[in-house]
Image: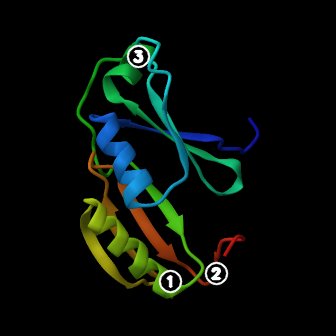
Amino acid sequence: MRPRLSVLTLAVDDLEASLRFYRDGLGLPTQGIIGREFEHGAVAFFDLAGGVKLAIWKQEDLAHDTGLTLSPRCPTAFSIGHNVAAREQVDQVMADARAAGADIVKPAQDTFYGGYAGYFRDPDGHLWEVVWNPANLPDDG
């Protein structure tokens, strides 16, 4: 397998609410919800850096598509890291997330590796880490 990530899909309870959180609250670019004409097909894609897409899809639809049984989400099963180019951008993203309805899990603070980071959970409990790491800065600033 080539080390390439193209789509990260998050299972959500309320597609419209999650769309508002990511589009209106965090400012991620999207065409909005598509696929409503298909049973279990409504989804929204957001454009991320490097051509990667973030998708939000109702959890019951993802369960239907995979054939797996619905189960509770565990917020510590994984986290999504959002690297920023400057320390002060961590505080701005955390403030934007809070204003959009995120739960601040860990306020931004200095890290053991010389960076600065904080954690928030989106309305569905997905864990995001906002990171400024001087040893791992994003290419796009």
Mark in the foreground, 2 or 1: 2
Mark 2 lies on residue: 135
> Whole-Å distance between the Cαs marked 2 and 1?
9 Å
In the rendered view, tell whether residue 137 sits above or below residue 42.
below
| Quarter occupied by the N terminus | top right
Query: Going 27% across and 34% down the picture, which residue do you hit?
Result: 13
Location of residue 141 by image quarter: bottom right
First in sequence: mark 3 vs mark 1: 3
Q: Residue 40 carries which label?
A: 3
First in sequence: mark 3 vs mark 2: 3
Q: Is mark 1 on a helix, strand or loop?
A: loop
Image coords of residue 40 (percent x, y): 41, 16
CA neighbours of label 2 inside 10 A, class few (<14), some (14 to 19), many (20+):
few
- Residue type, numbered disc 3: His
First in sequence: mark 2 vs mark 1: 1
Mark 1 lies on residue: 113
